[in-house]
Image (cartoon, grey):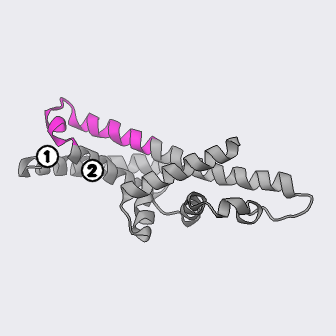
Amino acid sequence: MTTEELRFVEALYRRMYDRLMRYALETLGDAARAEDVIQSTFELACLNVAALTRHPAPEGWVFVTFRNLVKTSAKERAGDVMLLERLQSRAAAGENAHNDETDPDVLYGDLLDLPEYRLLREYVDCGKTVAEFAETMGISAEACKKRLQRARNRLRRYFRE
């Protein structure tokens, strides 16, 4: 990226940051996740800076990209929570007569052997953003997103069986 392109993206960031943060906070309700989405948006802006500088409405491009990332982030988080709630409700329905415990770790011992389950469970329980969670794992945010995606897909297949 050239110095001129860097200045262009930086100017966009400074102009739009407050508006993007307000939108993300209203939608996601979490400042850390909001910051994570804003950073991902401008990472994409940097990767596509040549097209962005020629775009007739660069702020519109950034906002549409940002809004899509916010929606994706909200859906992923809700999906993670729903998967664990499904486990707990299945466990409660199936084991209620014999056991009051609804912890999926106890009732779905076969899932404990799946690294994907442990990863997703740890992510949901910690309440961190993907970037923060990735940092604790010592991997990049993109690698963490991909691992979480694979974990979700594996658990969905488990529910279909």
Q: On the rendered structure, is 19 left or right of 6?
A: right
Check disc 1 and give the amino acid type.
Answer: Phe
Within 10 Å of disc 2 (Cα), the crowding (few <14, some 14-19, many 20+) is: few
Mark sitting on residue 8: 1
The residue positioned 56% from the left and 58% from the top of the image is: 116
Q: CA distance from mark 1 to mark 2?
A: 13 Å
Highlighted magenta segment, given as a residue range:
48-71
57 with respect to 126 (left or right): left
Q: Is residue 67 magenta?
A: yes
Q: Position of residue 93 (x, y in %)?
A: 84, 51
Residue 108 versus residue 19 in the image, above or below: below
Examine the rendering and report whether any part of residue 78 can be seen: no
Residue 42, image x, y percentages: 27, 49
Residue holding disc 2: 43
Q: Compared with residue 100, is residue 4 higher up or lower down, i.e. above or below? A: above
Q: Residue 137's quadrant in the figure?
A: bottom left
Front in this rendered view, residue 83 or 9: 83
* Left or right side of 113 for 140: left
Magenta-colored stretch includes residue 152: no
Q: Is residue 6 visible?
A: yes
Majority secondary structure of magenta residues: helix
